[in-house]
Image (tube, rainbow, N blue to C red):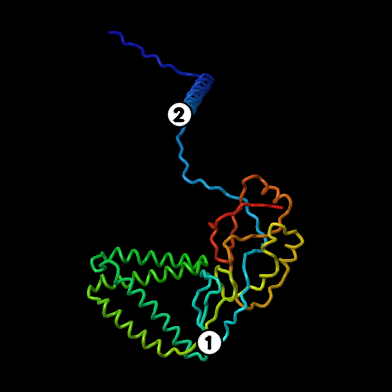
Amino acid sequence: MAKKKERKWTLDAKTRVLVRRVVVIAAVVVLLGTLGFEIAKLRQNPIQTTTAVEETIPEAVNTEVFVLRDEQTVQTDLSGYTVLFVQDGERVGSNAQIAARFADSGSAKRYADLVELRAEYARYAALSNGREYSSMKVEALMQKAAEKVCAFIGAADSGNIAAAKTYENDFLGQETALEIAVTGDLDLSSKIAELSQKLEAQEATVGEFESVTTGVDSSGYFFSRTDGCEDVLSYADADKLTVEQIELALKEKPAQSSGSKIVKSHVWYVAAILDAQTADKLTVKKSSVRIAFPKAGVPDSARSESARPR
């Protein structure tokens, strides 16, 4: 029986190099084709994106300004043993009574205690005429008390003394209501009777005092001190100020603080000197600027006013 002969195929060196080149070229073609196909897919089905944060960065100008307020100086003497009836920033009427002057510190202290007693009496009297706090949830009262504290801090930080005083009184009312809700046995009638007796006894110890008024026929917001710049520029001429007048005002040193003052309006003017290029940007119709006073504790969210460059 004859045997089959097996043939062995062998490639020479030149042929092997040629085959390798063909394989490499084919692999590169496949790779480029795949890459092109993926790019085409991305173009046909782009990735969907969503804006996570969007922020507008405004142009800022740092400059020195002069603030003009419609205010009237009050030449009242608050020296000596005086007790103020109003807080700075509180609104007062024409020729309002703003303080009481006493002959000695003891009388002034007793009168200040009397004022606190009157406020406490009024608070309990208001609570007695209100709802039954013992039936309210403690959590709700605690939440209200916390809100009053936050409101007080916000008003104090912004310099709104009148509002801060109101929130303080509101908190004290919530505190008493919370006490009623927790204990359930606070007798308001006996508390009011006790405070009434204390008031009567305290009033007998105060004695005579001199009433201090603003002495002017103007109502507005009372401030116990002046800043010494009230007479540097005229509020009435705010729309007519020149660059030279503002320059001189910014260089002016404040006079010694004396007396008190009444600020008649919340409308203030801010005078500043800007270069021509910056001022031109503010002349666009309906443009406005936001004024921040970082060293005065005024937040950046302060209300903006219309810009009126000259």
Dot 1 falls on a residue whose secondary structure is strand
Residue at image position (59%, 76%) is: 215
- Mark 2 belongs to which amino acid? Asn
Left or right, residue 170 beside residue 101 = left
Residue at image position (61%, 61%) is: 268
Across the whole image, how many numbered discs are drawn on residues?
A: 2
Which is closer to the viewer, label 2 or label 1?
A: 1
Q: Relative to 213, is 63 above or below?
A: above
Local crowd at mark 2 within 10 Å, few (<14), some, or many (≥20)? Answer: few
Instruction: Pinpoint residue 4: horizontal percent, then vertical percent.
Output: 33, 11
Quarter where residue 204 is shown = bottom left
Local crowd at mark 1 within 10 Å, few (<14), some, or many (≥20)? Answer: some
Image quarter of the N terminus: top left
- For label 2, the residue is 45
The disc label shown at residue 99, or none? none
Residue at image position (42%, 71%) is: 168
The disc label shown at residue 81, or none? 1
Instruction: Pinpoint residue 234: horizontal percent, then vertical percent.
Output: 69, 65
- Mark 1 belongs to which amino acid? Tyr
Quarter where residue 10 is shown = top left
Q: Nearer the viewer, residue 185 or 76?
A: 76
Q: Relative to 146, is 309 above or below?
A: above
Q: Relative to 106, is 149 above or below?
A: above
Instruction: Pinpoint residue 237: horizontal percent, then vertical percent.
Output: 70, 61
Left or right, residue 225 beside residue 24 = right
Dot 2 falls on a residue whose secondary structure is loop
Q: Nearer the viewer, residue 209 or 15?
A: 209
Q: Earlier in the sequence, mark 2 or mark 1?
A: 2
